[in-house]
Amino acid sequence: MRHLIPTIRPLAATDFDQWCDLWRQYLEFYQSSVPQAVYDTTFERLIDPDNPAQNAHIADQAGTLVGLVHFIYHPHNWRIENVCYLQDLFTAPKTRGMGVGRALIQSVYDVADNNGTPSVYWLTQDFNKPARLLYDRIATQTPFIKYQR
């Protein structure tokens, strides 16, 4: 069975409602939520050309958004160049296993390479086994453990 490969593109102002739905599903997966003001503010930051640190790409399948990735550039004390933190990655359940997540990550790798950013990193929950199967194929797991206040 052939799958329609989605187009990976930057988030656009017209994507707000579908983006909200995808991000809400992502947050629910991690048993979290944010107020509407955070959706509004984050979206504005992600599409603002004057805010190049925060970015988003989406997977568009014939006008329906089926995935998103948010990524942030920031300075790093051990490098001259910025690094890229891939903060959120989500694909619609109906598209899982079809390469959408891989394509979204590759889009971040491509933009980071074009930006001269040598490092892309992210975190995931240890229980997220399906995602970790992909991550183990396209990246190197580090031994770091996250602490948070």
Image: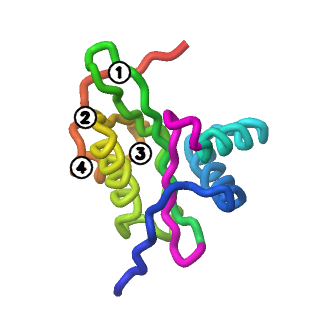
Q: Give the mark, 3 or 1, whose residue is nearer the N terminus.
A: 3
Secondary structure beneath label 1:
loop
| Labels 2 & 3 near each other (Cβ < 8 A) | no
Q: Which residue is mark 2?
A: 118
Res 138 label: 4
Q: Which residue is mark 3?
A: 128
Q: Is residue 29 left or right of residue 8?
A: right
Other residues around mark 3 within 10 Å, as few (<14) / some (14–19) / many (≥20): few
Q: Which residue is mark 1?
A: 145
Under mark 2, the amino acid is Pro
Q: Which residues are magenta?
A: 49-63
Under mark 4, the amino acid is Ile
Give how far across and how far down residue 129 sits, in percent. 36, 48
Q: CA distance from mark 2 to mark 3?
A: 26 Å
Q: Nearer the viewer, residue 13 or 98?
A: 13
Dividing the image into 4 quarters, which one contains the C terminus? top right
